[in-house]
Amino acid sequence: MNARVEYVLRLGDSALVLAQRSAAWVAHAPIMEEDVALANVALDLFGQAKLWLEYAAEIEGAGRDADALAFHRDADEYRNVLLVEQPNGNFADTIVRGYFYDAWAELNLNALRASSDERIAAIAAKSVKETAYHLQRSRDWLLRLGDGTELSHERVQLAVDELWRFSGELFIGDEIDAAMNAQGVGSDPATLREQWLESVRAALAAATLTTPEDGWMQRGGKQGRHSEALSYMLAEMQVLPRSHPGALW
Amino acid sequence: MKNEWPLWEIFVRSENGLAHKHVGSLHAADAEMAVQNARDLYTRRNEGVSIWVVRSSDIVATDPSQREALFEPSEDKAYRHATFYQVPDGVKHL
């Protein structure tokens, strides 16, 4: 498979999986206003995923469209980072997962605005405005929960500790990243790590939370090695188009 | 949880030059959350360029039982209305 297709799929799949996860909160959020807010974030991410997957399908040139990529690939063909496929857990788990992703996505999309691939630069420029808002929201929630009640503090610290091992993958490059970086198409993931750490450390400190020590980082999502959780999520997401191929509203 | 969060009144300005207009209310734990929730609830379809949020408890309202004393005296004073003037063409938002 062509490196550029693979690179764009990774961007699209991470947005799509996080969108599907966030959308699962609809009708389950702690308050109606939050229900709408999470749905809005999910819709933004679905929109971003659509733009990336349409482009991936186009450069792949195998006659597949964005829907075929979203609904007719199995978990081992998905290229999202492991962080976004982690189950929703409690509200603190969802907020921390979103915050880690948003803080990375904003840096990454900003870097991709300078991509030599005009289409990638355009999608990044459009998406980064939405992501800047998502980041503001998830960071504010992190502060509220961390600096909130004893229970909210305990839960959000637990979420930070649990999800920390999935944050490293965002910054680990492989041969696809190297090839795209060499062509000026993509960004080198490792270069974003310092900035991400700096802003995450500052946010955690402001939230009276402890930044975990760096330990073993889980990896493999970008290469298609996923946790079991993704298969269950995809089964639910894909059941309709797979049971009724070509069905339209 | 919902009962502990205060109610906020939301005002949206639809375009520059117009006044902020009351659009509804929502619950939020603090002012920042109220602004963000207002953005998500009331400006998703390009309705606004600016949002104000005010705690509902900070709004001082007229007493409904004072309605006659406050508002009825103006009902029969038609000369206070600017209905006797021609509005020049091209005047918007009058």
Image: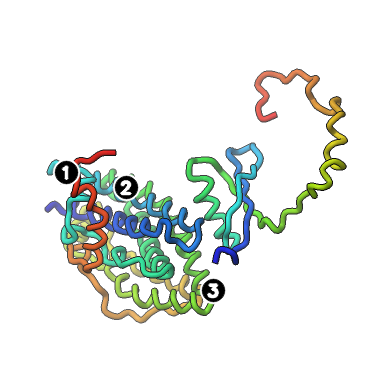
Number of the label disc, if any, that sits on residue B86: none
Q: Is residue A177 left or right of residue A157?
A: left
Residue at 18%, 66% (x, y): give it. A225
Question: How far across and how far down the image is residue A224, in percent?
Answer: 18, 62
Q: Badge 3: few (under 14), some or many (20 or more) residues near its Cα, within 10 Å?
A: some
Residue at 38%, 50% (x, y): give it. A43
The three-letter amino acid code for the residue at tag 2 is: Ala
Q: Do marks 1 and 3 share a subunit?
A: yes
For label 1, the residue is A64
First along the sequence among labels 3 and 2 = 2
Q: In which quarter of the image is residue A105?
A: bottom left
In space, the residues marked 2 and 1 are separated at their CA atoms by 23 Å
Task: Check the residue under mark 3 and report the chain it is in.
Answer: A
Question: How far across and how far down the image is residue A131, in percent?
Answer: 41, 55
For label 2, the residue is A121
Residue ranking furthest to the front: B65
Task: Check the residue under mark 2 and report the chain it is in.
Answer: A
Q: Indicate the secondary structure of the residue bearing disc 2.
A: helix
In space, the residues marked 1 and 3 are separated at their CA atoms by 48 Å
Colour scheme in use: rainbow
Task: Check the residue under mark 1 and report the chain it is in.
Answer: A
In the rendered view, would you say A108 is above or below A199? above
For label 3, the residue is A148
Q: Badge 1: few (under 14), some or many (20 or more) residues near its Cα, within 10 Å?
A: some
For this rendering, which residue is in front, A106 or A25? A25
Q: Indicate the secondary structure of the residue bearing disc 1.
A: loop
The three-letter amino acid code for the residue at tag 1 is: Arg
In space, the residues marked 3 and 2 are separated at their CA atoms by 39 Å
